[in-house]
Image: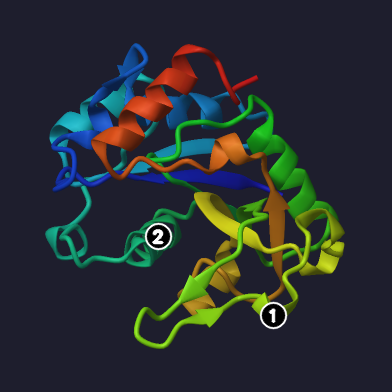
């Protein structure tokens, strides 16, 4: 079973300009993901898909391959991650490169344990999954719809968190990484398809960088090696 790590990284970022290559805890943000994928024993190749020459240069300098610059029509603010994934799958077919699975690695989630990808790939294989998403358990109670509030739990009989059954514990999609069989991805055009599995990670790996507050918080964790061992 051959797995390629796919790291999408557009040049444009409205929230934090140059976010993907902004220095965090001593190295560009994207390098944290490249290094984790490169150090995985079960990842056969690490690819960065970008529309930026600068990102491509940094990616190559840190061991990733950048076989092309992503076309403009799938690089804008409205472009989906799936469009970049499928573009790369087409490139693989045209270049006669065969891989079974695509490990989607999100740059904005830099906090991951050293063996995280290998553990997830083994879980994916052992459970004969078609796709997988990283999640973390949440013991918080959620509501939705400000105009017509609806609770995700029975607020008239508020449960104690410690009394929740395993099947009742909600899991939050962290966005850190996904694994998808390439055959299924091309058929369904979605990273989650077929037999879907959840791979549980600790809370510290759930943080995503979308703002400067997130950036400073994750930088502190990385500097102190929290969640990276």
Mark 1 residue crowding within 10 angstroms, few (<14) / some (14–19) / many (20+):
few
Mark before the other along the chain sequence, 2 or 1: 2
Q: Which mark is residue 168?
A: none
Image location (x, y in percent) of residue 47: 41, 40
Asked whether disc 2 touches disc 1, contact meaning CB atoms under 8 Å apart, the reply is: no
Q: Residue furthest bottom?
A: 148
Mark 2 residue crowding within 10 angstroms, few (<14) / some (14–19) / many (20+):
many
Q: Could you tell me which residue is drawn at 42 percent across and 19 percent down?
A: 220
Image quarter (top left, top right, bottom left or bottom right) of the C terminus: top right
Foreground of the two, 111 or 119: 111
What SS does tag 2 mark?
helix
Q: Could you tell me which residue is drawn at 18 percent across and 45 percent down?
A: 15
Residue at the disc numbered 1: 156
Q: Could you tell me which residue is drawn at 60 percent across and 64 percent down?
A: 141
Left or right: 82 in relation to 182: left
Residue at the disc numbered 2: 85
């Amino acid at each position: 079973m051959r797995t390629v790590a796919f790291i999408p990284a557009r040049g444009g970022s409205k929230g934090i300009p140059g976010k993907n290559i902004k220095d965090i805890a001593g190295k560009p943000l994207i390098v944290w993901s490249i290094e984790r994928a490169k150090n995985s024993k079960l990842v056969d190749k690490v690819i960065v898909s970008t529309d930026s020459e600068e990102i491509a240069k940094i990616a190559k300098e840190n061991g990733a391959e950048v076989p092309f610059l992503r076309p403009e029509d799938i690089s804008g603010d409205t472009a989906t991650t799936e469009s970049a994934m499928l573009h790369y799958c087409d490139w693989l077919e045209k270049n006669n490169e065969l891989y079974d699975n695509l490990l989607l690695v999100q740059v904005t989630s830099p906090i991951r344990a050293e063996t995280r990808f290998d553990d997830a790939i083994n879980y994916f294989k052992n459970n004969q999954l078609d796709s997988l998403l990283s999640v973390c358990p949440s013991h918080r109670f959620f509501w939705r719809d400000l105009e017509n509030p609806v609770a995700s739990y029975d607020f008239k009989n508020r449960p104690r968190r410690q009394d929740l059954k395993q099947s009742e514990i909600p899991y939050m999609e962290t966005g850190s990484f996904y694994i998808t069989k390439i055959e299924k991805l091309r058929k369904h055009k979605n990273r989650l398809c077929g037999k879907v599995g959840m791979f549980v990670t600790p809370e510290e790996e759930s943080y995503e960088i979308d703002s400067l507050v997130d950036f400073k918080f994750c930088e502190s964790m990385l500097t102190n090696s929290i969640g990276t061992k």
